[in-house]
Amino acid sequence: MSSVFVFNGPSSSGKTSIAKAVQAGLSQNFLRFSIDDFYRFFNPDTPNDWKFYYSLNQVFFRMIRASLELGYNAVIDTVFERKECYDECVKNFNDFQMYFIGFYCSSSILMQREVERGNRPIGLAERQANIVNDFVDYNLTVHTDTESIEACSRKIISFIQTNTWG
């Protein structure tokens, strides 16, 4: 049975960097999916409103489901902007081994990272930090403001290796 590990947390919390490190550290066949990468498939002039974001999540999760049905395991890097996104994720993966990993980071570090990145609206991460973790019961959490990328990656890899079926 395929396993899916869902990384959820605010923008700039380190999900993508850690997902890449986790994928590189796994010996099993894991695919890494990022909502940010998927978003880049769309025309940049597409209005980024709630209706679009929700439909993007629907397509994103269905594409990943197809990979799971073919026997791949998945690491997903996403942001549950609203409970509907979380519900869509659960609906698509409820018949697979599904684990949620929460990413936490202090507001001051999130803002610092946003400024350094220069590709996110300042304040987005802090706004997301106040909502994305409200409705998810995590199997594992990491605190990227107090733990290094390497430490978080090792912690997650250990968790994945312990919980992967097949």
Image (cartoon, rainbow, N blue to C red):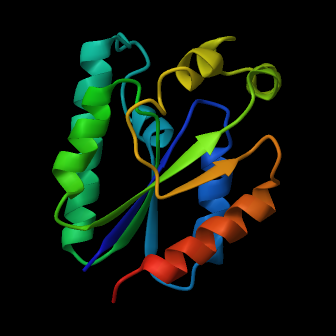
Could you tell me if residue 59 is visible in this image?
no
Q: How many marks?
A: 0
Give percent across and percent down for residue 130: 55, 20
Give percent across and percent down for residue 108: 81, 21
Could you tell me if residue 110 is visible in this image?
yes
Q: Residue at x 24, y 52 (%)?
A: 63
Quadrant of res 148: bottom right
In the displayed structure, does residue 13 sit left or right of residue 102? right
Query: 57 or 104: which is nearer to us?
Result: 104
Q: Taking 126 as reference, is 96 above or below it?
A: below
Query: 4 or 24: which is nearer to us?
Result: 4
Q: Residue at x 42, y 32 (%)?
A: 39
Q: Quadrant of the N terminus?
A: bottom left
Q: Residue at x 40, y 32 (%)?
A: 80
Give percent across and percent down for residue 34: 47, 46
Quadrant of res 157: bottom right
Give percent across and percent down for residue 109: 81, 28
Query: 86 or 24: which is nearer to us?
Result: 86
Query: 165 or 65: which is nearer to us?
Result: 165
Q: Quadrant of the C terminus?
A: bottom left
Q: Taking 19 as reference, is 22 above or below it?
A: below
Q: Residue at x 33, y 74 (%)?
A: 72
Q: Taking 145 as reference, is 65 above or below it?
A: below
In the displayed structure, does residue 75 sit left or right of residue 119? left
In the displayed structure, does residue 136 sit left or right of residue 152? left
